[in-house]
Image: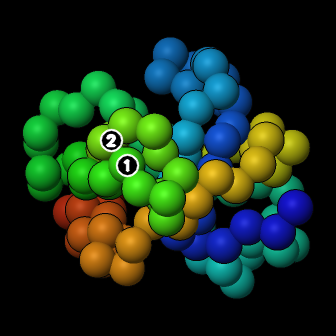
Amino acid sequence: MEISRGDIVLASGPGDFTRKPRPFLVVQSNAFNRVHGSVSLCPVTSDRAGEGWIRIGLASTTETGLDRDSEVEIDKISTLRRDRIVKPIGKAPAVAMHRVDEALRRWLEL
């Protein structure tokens, strides 16, 4: 399955925050998405905390494929094996990806 940075995918992951199949935002560079066996993602949650500097809002739209307004959890970056991705469900708007990039730089102090 082909995925790109900015895609919102349904995946199941290990750990406290990612056990059930849920949406994730692909944050890994496209330079690695076709060839690498794992993918770096941020979970997407409908349990909104409103922490705009580390949680980036995504609206429920046909573009995002989300059924509820949600937030990208920048503070819970995960890397999953590619085979844990079930399917792509949507795409984050360019404005949201810009905010994700800013939040990732803050969180990782880049």
Q: Which residue is mark 1?
A: 60
* Mark 2 residue type: Ser
Residue 65 in picture, x, y percent from top left: 53, 52
Q: Quadrant of the C terminus?
A: bottom left
Residue 80 in picture, x, y percent from top left: 70, 43
Visible residue check, residue 93: yes
Measured in 3D between alpha carbons, the distance from the residue under mark 2 to the one under mark 1, in whole angstroms, is 7 Å
Residue 7 in picture, x, y percent from top left: 59, 64
Is the residue 17 above or below the residue 27 in the image? above
Residue drawn at point x = 47 percent, y = 45 percent: 66
Residue drawn at point x = 86 percent, y = 43 percent: 83
* Mark 1 residue type: Ser
Which of the 4 image quadrants contains residue 33? bottom right
Q: Secondary structure at mark 2?
A: strand
Q: Residue furthest bottom?
A: 31
Residue drawn at point x = 49 percent, y = 59 percent: 62
Disc 2 packing (10 Å; few <14; some 14–19; many ≥20): many
Q: Which residue is mark 2?
A: 70
In the image: residue 53, left or right of residue 93: left
